[in-house]
Image (cartoon, rainbow, N blue to C red):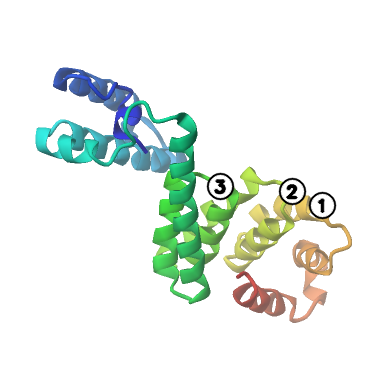
Amino acid sequence: MDHYKLLGVARNCSPSEIHHAFRELSRKMHPDRFKDKERERAEKEYQLIVKAYNTLKDERLRKEYDKTLTPVGVSAAAEESNTEAQYQQALRAGVAKYNQKQFELASDLLARAIFVKETAEAHYYKGIAEIRLPRRRKSGLDSLQRACELDAFNARYLKSYSRALLEFGLTVRARPVIDRLIELVPDDPEALELQAVVSPDAGKKGGLFSSLFDRFRGDNS
């Protein structure tokens, strides 16, 4: 994310303009103004704003940062191509680390990919990596949910999100996700198994939870 764009100022802006922009954004975006999930998102966004401000307000840091930017006058297509290249590089590296079962590294790389360009696929891999890390499970569930929001017709995302919710005992949250999955693939055996878990007679499906979660841990690559 371009620090100048984040603060809403031009590249040739004055120090006073940077300070004024930061003050206005702080007033609107400070995390204390939000609650619950909105606060979590605001905290992440505010950290980016503070980082941008701390870089641009310092003359030396600003000069060093300016050297990393696409020169003014370069076509939008070229800049977009550069962004896509950065995204693809981070995504491929993150998926590779996931396949190597280096889940923490995978999570960090995929977060970088999302920062450059938010996509369902990056959120999906970030989610299935993070739910394997006890301290990042909540973030992993959020990423899986976001993947499903960005691509509501992807059965693979819905299956993984459903299995994760059930594994962590979040049956109520899982039901509408599974209902959506059944709408998409009504005859899919795995979707039907997931539906059976949340149905009133799920207790008659001995061993179903175990088999579903074993599959979840082994086939998400």
Badge 1 amino acid: Leu
Residue of label 2: 153
Q: Nearer the viewer, residue 37 or 151?
A: 151
Say whether marks 1 and 2 touch (CB < 8 Å): yes
Residue farthest toward the right in the current orientation of the protein: 187
| Mark 2 vs mark 3, CA separation in Å | 14 Å
Q: Nearer the viewer, residue 63 or 55?
A: 63
| Mark 1 vs mark 2, CA separation in Å | 7 Å
Say whether marks 1 and 3 touch (CB < 8 Å): no
On the image, the x and y values in percent for residue 4 come to 30, 29
Looking at the image, which residue is at 36% across and 26% down?
Answer: 73
* Crowdedness near tag 2: few (<14), some (14–19) or many (≥20) residues, C-alpha within 10 Å: some
Quadrant of the snapshot with the C terminus: bottom right
Looking at the image, which residue is at 31% across and 39% down?
Answer: 48
Residue of label 1: 184
Mark 1 / mark 2, whichever is N-terminal: 2
Looking at the image, which residue is at 39% across and 33% down?
Answer: 34
Mark 2 / mark 3, whichever is N-terminal: 3
| Res 132 visible | no
Where, by quadrant of the figure, is residue 57 drawn?
top left
